[in-house]
Amino acid sequence: MNRGWSYRDRVGPGAAGLRISTFYSQNYPHSNAGCWRRRIGDGEIELNGVPARDDRLLAAGDELVWHRPPWQEPAVPLQFSIIHDDGDLMIVNKPSGLPVMPGGGFLEHTLLRLLEGCWPSDPPRPVHRLGRGTSGLLICARQSRSRAWLSAALRDHGRAPSEGTAASAVFIEKIYRCRTVKAELETEGRIDVPIGRLAHPRLGRLWCADPQGLPSRSDYRLLRREANSNLLEV
């Protein structure tokens, strides 16, 4: 069992007039309004610093806190290896099954918490994410300036400014290997299906194909055809 967690929310103008249970069921869709009413009755919800006594209407600026009791997290691999560490950057080999950040029912069973446990005074911070089911190399920053610089480079998929007078060109490219179901694929191709964050009953929200989502593009190269699958570089 973990030690539980407190989730804090500030009610914006668009949520004014909603009941507490409606606010939570819209923002935390893993539970319906009935579940949130039971949590109010159990004393898990605070409104403006005091326990919420009923499912009252909210006003803009109200502060809500859900004190989630301790829960049993799903089992995950709790080991990782360090490929590189120069005191500024750390490259971690993340195993499949280990989430990087808390969320979707995971709190202590995450790479972030493992890093904080190994370096409690000044833990390395992940610069980007890999999905829970993805294994591979993850960049962590040991210095705050390095983290900000690399985060900008990853966000822009290309150049990040240097602090000197001369610009320094940095190009960051993410390359994945993935296994797909057996399908007839060209040796090279492009996937440009829009993606969006869709609700998952246990994992919160996941990036999935969504016709109303954001534009996306992935270029793939077929590495190997196998009996029941294809191996791609993406």
Image (cartoon, grey):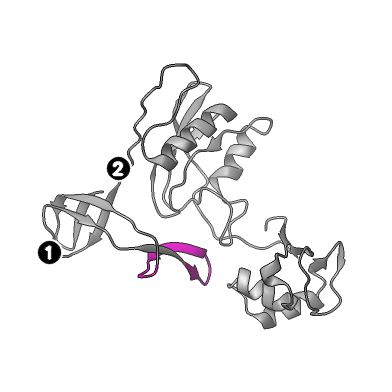
Which disc number belongs to residue 125?
none
Q: Is residue 139 visible?
A: no
Q: Secondary structure at mark 1?
A: loop
Q: Amino acid at mark 2?
A: Ile
> For the N terminus, which image quadrant?
bottom right
> Pointer 1: residues within 10 angstroms few (<14), some, or many (20+)?
few
Chain-order first, disc 1 or disc 2:
2
Q: Is residue 211 magenta?
A: yes
Query: Residue under circle 2?
Result: 175
169, 189: nearer the viewer: 169
> Pointer 2: residues within 10 angstroms few (<14), some, or many (20+)?
few
Q: Amino acid at mark 1?
A: Glu
At which x and y percent is residue 121? 69, 30
| 159 left or right, relative to 31 | left
189, 45: nearer the viewer: 189
> Which portion, as a residue range, is magenta?
198-212
Which disc number belongs to residue 184?
1
At which x and y percent is residue 76? 51, 54
At which x and y percent is residue 176? 30, 46
Vertical side of 112 occupied by 170: above or below? above
Q: Residue furthest top?
A: 165
Tell whether label 2 touches label 1 (CB within 8 Å): no
| 179 left or right, relative to 51 | left
Q: Is residue 137 magenta?
A: no
Residue in the picture at 70% in, 67% down: 13
Report the magenta stretch's main SS: strand
Q: Is residue 16 visible?
A: yes
Q: CA distance from mark 1 to mark 2?
A: 22 Å
Residue in the picture at 58% in, 72% down: 30
